[in-house]
Image (tube, helix red, strand yellow):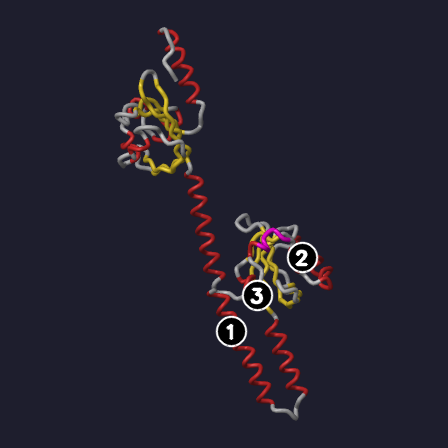
Amino acid sequence: MASPGGRSGVVDARILCRSLIDAVNDVILVIDRQSLRILDANKRAIEVYGYPREELIGRSLRDLTHAEPAPFRFRGKVPDQNFEETHFSSTGERLDFLVNLSELEYWGRNAVVSINRDIRDRKRAELALAASEKRQRLLLQNISEMVATIDATGRIRFIGPQVEHVLGYAPADVLGRDIFDFIHPDDQERARAEYSSTVLEPGEAAPSVLRLKDQAGNWVAFEVIANNQLHDPDVAGIIATARDLRFRRDAQQAIHRASLGLDTNIDEHTLELARANAALRVENHQRRFT
């Protein structure tokens, strides 16, 4: 931005420069490389920092950062990279910026232009997401059921870590897949009809027993409960919980065998059932903490 020749040309160029930087929605600061004082600022900078223009111009950059600026960013060749930096407004409000620096000659002064993108909304979103993920982890580590969030079309949008321990799939291999890809062909028609009804009716649907395919190609029976939360913007999906019925099936068979074998040792079947129950408890404990 070399100084143009002639007084009128300088005035016109300054007006044009002012119009251009004021039209930008990012904060723009022009900083003297030697003193690190602000030579110019756009309208957005005045609004965000909260200083009158006459107070912001001439102010040291360290007054905005509340710290000594890293000298390597202003001495020698300015690095062509973005970095995050915290500034503070006139009232002490924290301002999170993604900063980009570039060198320029500003009306005969050796300067750096700092273009600061306000990322406070992004930071708030990241904090909210992190809090949500933490709540999810706390919830999931205390249950043994598989948990998934499915959209109205049947696509899996979230899957809990239990899927790896129960069915052998990595969560990344399941995300985005059609839930019906995992349902037994003989259960498909009923499952689709039940899901269509669930999509139309908010709240929890009646439990359904479905066979799901594991990584090895085996079919495992689950008791599935679907809860329609499509109307809730924080969920925007159907929450499905699936309880492994293998223990229930084994227990039923053990009880059935015991009821038929009256001339056999009932204690043996009772012990068999107790072992199956203990194995399930151990498996559930492992699912919670692995």
What amino acid is found at the position of numbered circle 2 in the picture? Answer: Asp
What amino acid is found at the position of numbered circle 3 in the picture? Answer: Val
Name the spot of residue 160 as percent of width and height, x first.
53, 58
Is 203 situated left or right of 112 in this image?
Answer: right
Is 261 situated left or right of 42 in this image?
Answer: right
Image vertical order of residue 46 relative to residue 169, above or below? above
Kindly indicate whether the residue at mark 1 contacts the one at mark 3 (C-beta within 8 angstroms).
no
Task: Indicate the secondary structure of the residue bearing disc 3.
Answer: helix
Name the spot of residue 150 as percent of width and height, x first.
60, 54
From the image, state whether disc 1 or disc 2 is nearer to you.
2
Sequence-first tag of 2 and 3: 3
Tell me the CA gap for discs 2 and 3.
17 Å
Sequence-first tag of 1 and 2: 2
Task: Indicate the secondary structure of the residue bearing disc 2.
Answer: helix
Tell me the CA gap for discs 1 and 2.
29 Å
10 Å neighbourhood of mark 2: few (<14), some, or many (≥20)?
Answer: few
10 Å neighbourhood of mark 3: few (<14), some, or many (≥20)?
Answer: some
* Residue 63 is covered by the magenta coloring: no
Task: Indicate the secondary structure of the residue bearing disc 1.
Answer: helix
Instruction: Tell me which segment is drawn in magenta.
Output: 173-177
Residue that mark 3 sits on: 166
Residue toward you, 130 or 207: 130
Q: Residue at x 61, y 78 (%)?
A: 251
Residue toward you, 34 or 289: 34
Q: Residue furthest bottom?
A: 263
Q: Which mark is residue 181?
A: 2
Residue that mark 1 sits on: 281
Tell me the CA gap for discs 3 and 1.
14 Å
Q: Quadrant of the N terminus?
A: top left
10 Å neighbourhood of mark 1: few (<14), some, or many (≥20)?
Answer: few
